[in-house]
Amino acid sequence: MQNRLQNRQIKGAQQHSGAINQDSDRKERLDLHMHSYYSDDGEFSPTDLVKMCAAEGVTVMAITDHNSATANIEAKAAAEAYGVQYVCGIELDCTYGPYNLHVLGYCINPHNPLYRELEAQILLQEKAASVKRLALTSSMGFYIDRDHLEHLSPNGVYTGEMFAEVLLHDPRNQENELLMPYRFGGLRSDNPYVNFYWDFYAKDKPSYVKIQYQSLKEAIDLIQWDGGIAVLAHPGINFKDLLDRRFDCAYKEDFNPILSEMKTMGLQGIEVFSSYHSSALIVDLIKVAHEQNLLITCGSDFHGKTKPSVQIGHTGCEDVSQYAFLKRVLL
């Protein structure tokens, strides 16, 4: 797998122009980033996601659950039945300096016991953190329907998205000013649940509770241990402080060295095409990927109700040659 990636991807990246080709007759459609209910913030079963991909015309898919490879076995079998090509995947939480990052792993072995160990270890931390999140959420003056919360969380993990759903549906919170941006027509109402998470439960926010994640290097090593391909997920989210500046000199001075260091750790690709990235940012990231000889991937990051504006197959990529190249690398 490593040799296949190096021999095909590096040469292909150098030759690929990065132009976005609008071809209405294309038959290929890839979505390499979505979540099943094995992610705490996912809604659908692996088989449901396969059916949805088939219905939307997605021809190549990958389920990339948070710190879990469990969905891949069911999804791969379902994909064969529905005529969808499947890539085994995962999305690992990790840290790099002050940043909490997500790294996608493709062509992984879902039977690797290290993934099951990681999933169990994170679950224990998340259960303990959920008790603290509950207390912090209560301290902000919200009414919390515990029965509703327990219904949403059969495993005892309470996420920021779950709190958002519970709080927004509790009539006792109807006039709470903190919730107004997430209600219909509010400034944060496009993806109200996940926006509430980002605003209150992400790092450095009022209800943040630290989880001890592995380092970026450890995450890359785990993915590559049995031949997987490590890809930086949605940099427009995790490096927003840098990317908001677009491609000015300060950006290049800050971000290119970061990617160069990540490459020395083994990073092989970057998720350029994402539902979170503007067309202008995509063009900039294509340039950076070519400069760094990184594989360019595409993914919607579909979750279901926690991100209603994110739809399966909508990645921002309409480049037929990019699809064909990714298939050669991943399948």
Image (spheres, rainbow, N blue to C red):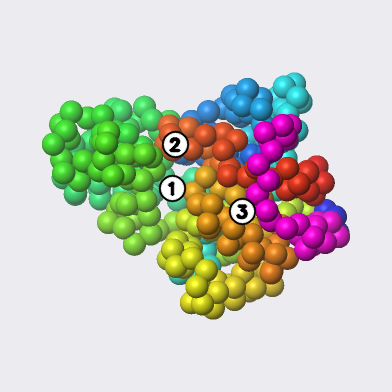
Residue 136 is situated, as x and y percent measured from the top left of the image, at: 25, 50
Q: Is residue 164 left or right of residue 35?
A: left
- How crowded pointer 1 is (Cα within 10 Å; few <14, some 14-19, many 20+) is rated as many
Q: In this view, does 84 lie above or below 40?
A: above
Residue at 47% x, 56% y is 237
- How crowded pointer 2 is (Cα within 10 Å; few <14, some 14-19, many 20+) is rated as some
Which residue corresponds to mark 2?
309
- How crowded pointer 3 is (Cα within 10 Å; few <14, some 14-19, many 20+) is rated as many
Q: What element carries label 2?
A: loop
Residue 276 is situated, as x and y percent measured from the top left of the image, at: 49, 49
Indicate which label's residue lies in the foreground, 3 or 1: 3
| Among the two numbered marks 3 and 1 on one chain, the one whose residue lies closer to the N terminus | 1
Q: Quadrant of residue 110?
A: top right
Residues under numbered marks 1 and 2 in contact, where contact means CB atoms less than 8 Å apart: no
- 254 part of magenta stretch: no
**In which quadrant is the C terminus drawn?**
top right
Amino acid found under the numbered disc labelled 3: Glu
| Among the two numbered marks 3 and 2 on one chain, the one whose residue lies closer to the N terminus | 3
Q: Is residue 67 left or right of residue 144?
A: right
Q: In which quarter of the image is residue 98?
A: bottom left
- 7 part of magenta stretch: yes
Amino acid found under the numbered disc labelled 1: Glu
Which residue corresponds to mark 1?
126
Q: Is residue 14 above or below residue 149?
A: below
Q: In this view, does 162 lie to the left or right of 35?
A: left
Name the disc covering residue 32, or none: none
Q: Is mark 1 on a helix, strand or loop?
A: helix
Range of residues picked out in magenta: 5-29
| Among the two numbered marks 1 and 2 on one chain, the one whose residue lies closer to the N terminus | 1
Nearer to us in this view, 28 or 218: 28
